[in-house]
Image (spheres, rainbow, N blue to C red):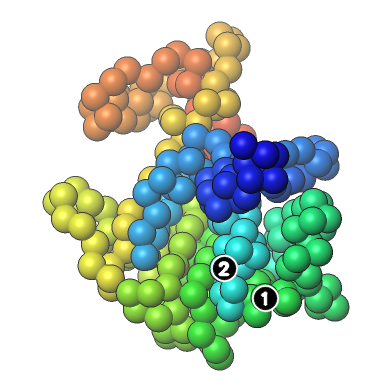
Amino acid sequence: MSDAKALSRHLSDQGWRLNNLYTITTKEGRKQPFRMNWAQQELWESLDLNNLVLKVRQIGISTFVHILFLDTCLFVPNTAAGVIAHSRESAEELFHRNIRSPYDDLPDAIRDVVGADRSSTRQLRFTNGSHISVHTSLRSGTYQLLHVSEFGKVCAKYPDRAREIVTGAFEAVPVGRGMKIVESTAEGREGYFHDYCRDAQALRDAGRKPSEHEFKFFFFPWWRHPEYRTTDTSIVVTDRRADYFREIEGEIGEQLPLSRRLWYVAKAATLGDDMMREYP
């Protein structure tokens, strides 16, 4: 098989494209090829129409979703993708880092086929009729793809904006034909995000498949992250923390390694009451 035919076959496979075409910028500011990590791969393999993700910090869910949306816009003509960030500064940062920069780093052969208008700081419009934009709210128009970033934070800090997202942006996605991905760390025990998580988790625990109006629940807790470990045995695990670890072990049916316990205690010493919010 010729190289051209092999490349054509690969380009028809979105999983291959996601893991081979795109670059990301690391926390240290370095460009590197994008490869799905454990959480991104799990989400990718199980995506549904409406997806609700409760997660810890720094596992790259937003990065993955934006690469997925960018890829879909490039390879599926006339796709409208919208991203909602919790602040204008965050919207501009997410757009530049996760969308515009990966597009600019694509091979020339792809950008020559699907060009982009780069005149906007928060939107790319492509020559195949697709477009992707990042805002703090979306109401007008129809979107086949919608991502709401840190929705729990929006619900806690900006309840009016959260209501606008639910009544406007959610309604802009065609029922049964569009995809929503709503994700956040935990932010309190009230508001849309908390209620959606409670209902979606109950649905999952009952073993029932979500309808086209219901959310599928994803949970990526701190104790699954491969990097959340330390071997610093000078850290003291208090009785209160030990009780918490035993509670988790009872729920998951396995013992937490000491390295994970020590990491949690050390991180909680810095974050205090915010630990459960940032690392559920």
**Disc 2 element:** loop
Q: Is residue 216 above or below residue 165?
A: above
Residue 202 as seen in the image, left or right of residue 114: left
- Residue for point 28% across, 73% down: 213
- Dot 1 and dot 2 residues touching (CB under 8 Å): no
Residue type, numbered disc 1: Asn
The residue at the far front in this view is: 1
Indicate the quadrant containing the N terminus: top left, top right, bottom left or bottom right. Answer: top right
Between the residue at mark 1 and the residue at mark 2, the CA separation in whole angstroms equals 8 Å
Q: Name above or below for residue 37 compared with residue 81.
A: above
State left or right for residue 48 relative to residue 231: left
Q: Which amino acid type is marked by label 2?
A: Val
Query: Where in the figure is residue 2, as x and y percent of width and height?
Result: 67, 39
Residue nearest the viewer, comparing 232 with 145: 145
Residue 144 coordinates in the image, percent (x, y): 49, 75
Q: Position of residue 260 (x, y in %)?
A: 48, 21
Q: Earlier in the sequence, mark 1 or mark 2?
A: 2
Q: Nearer the viewer, residue 35 or 146?
A: 35
Determine the image quadrant of residue 149: bottom right
Q: How many residues crowd mark 1 within 10 Å: few (<14), some (14–19), many (20+)?
A: some
Which numbered dot is residue 76?
Answer: 2
- Can you name the residue that lies furthest to the bottom here? 140
Is 2 or 16 nearer to us in this picture?
2
Residue 76 as seen in the image, left or right of residue 90: left
170 is higher (above) or lower (below) than 140? above
Identify the residue under disc 1: 128
The residue drawn where x is 52% and y is 26% is 226
